[in-house]
Amino acid sequence: MKTLFLVRHAKSSWDDPSLVDEDRPLNARGERDAPKMGKRLAKRDVQLDLILSSPANRAITTAQALADKLDYKLRNIVVDDRLYPGDMNVLLKSVHNLGDKLNCVMFVGHDPALSKLAHRLSSDIMHMPTCAVAQFTFQAKSWRDVRGATLVSVALDLPKKP
């Protein structure tokens, strides 16, 4: 089994117009939502083999908040330029190129690429709001096979859900 988590970064701040897009931080809501989603994943006993994050400040901060709640070492977060701003086809290729020793991987990135990839993997998901966590579990031995593999389960969790 291979499990992929797609996480859209938490809500970001537009307060400082002098910042370039990549440097924008989380706003107060984002700073609350990211750890909340991490706690939810921890309650489900999620054990990640790898977290890949966009280099954007808001994505890295989201990845760090999730990692902290999941006891995933912050130094093991891999910053991947392909996730910023992101392209659905590039992301899908990145999934297919993951090492097969990895069974549970998380991508932290941006819309619209993540929503498009989530929808491609499951038509049940139309849009990923900020800090949404989509989980896909495939019956596959290799990440290269997930395209044609049976999707065993799909879930979408949002910060606004109780």
Image (cartoon, rainbow, N blue to C red):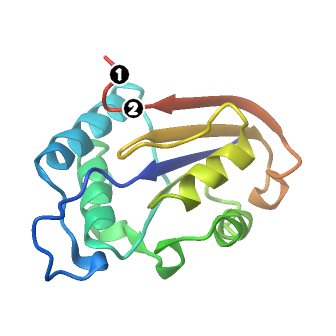
Residue 102 image position (x, y, % from top left): 61, 57
Residue 120 image position (x, y, % from top left): 73, 48
Q: Residues within 10 Å of mark 1 (few under 14, many from 20)?
A: few
Residue 35 vs residue 161, the one in the foreground: 161
**At 14% from the left edge and 54% from the top edge, which residue is drawn?**
27
Instruction: Tell me, yes or no, whether the two marked residues, 1 and 2, touch with CB atoms within 8 Å.
Output: yes
Q: Can residue 71 be seen by looking at this rendering?
A: yes
**At 74% from the left edge and 64% from the top edge, which residue is drawn?**
96
Amino acid type, residue under disc 2 in the picture: Leu
Residue 97 vs residue 122, the one in the foreground: 122
Q: Which residue is mark 2?
A: 158
**At 64% from the left edge and 53% from the top edge, which residue is drawn?**
116
Quarter that holds the N terminus: top right
Q: Is residue 38 left or right of residue 31?
A: right
Q: How many numbered marks does the figure carry?
A: 2
Quarter that holds the C terminus: top left
Find numbered disc 2 in the image and state the secondary structure of the residue it sits on: loop
Q: Eyeballing the image, is 15 above or below 106?
A: below
The quarter of the picture where residue 70 lies is: top left
Q: Is residue 155 left or right of residue 18?
A: right
The quarter of the picture where residue 51 lies is: bottom left
The quarter of the picture where residue 42 lies is: top left
Q: Is residue 18 left or right of residue 4?
A: left
**At 48% from the left edge and 58% from the top edge, which residue is drawn?**
111
Amino acid type, residue under disc 1 in the picture: Lys
Residue 20 image position (x, y, % from top left): 25, 82
Residue 87 vs residue 103, the one in the foreground: 87
Q: Which mark is residue 145?
A: none
Q: Which mark is residue 161?
A: 1
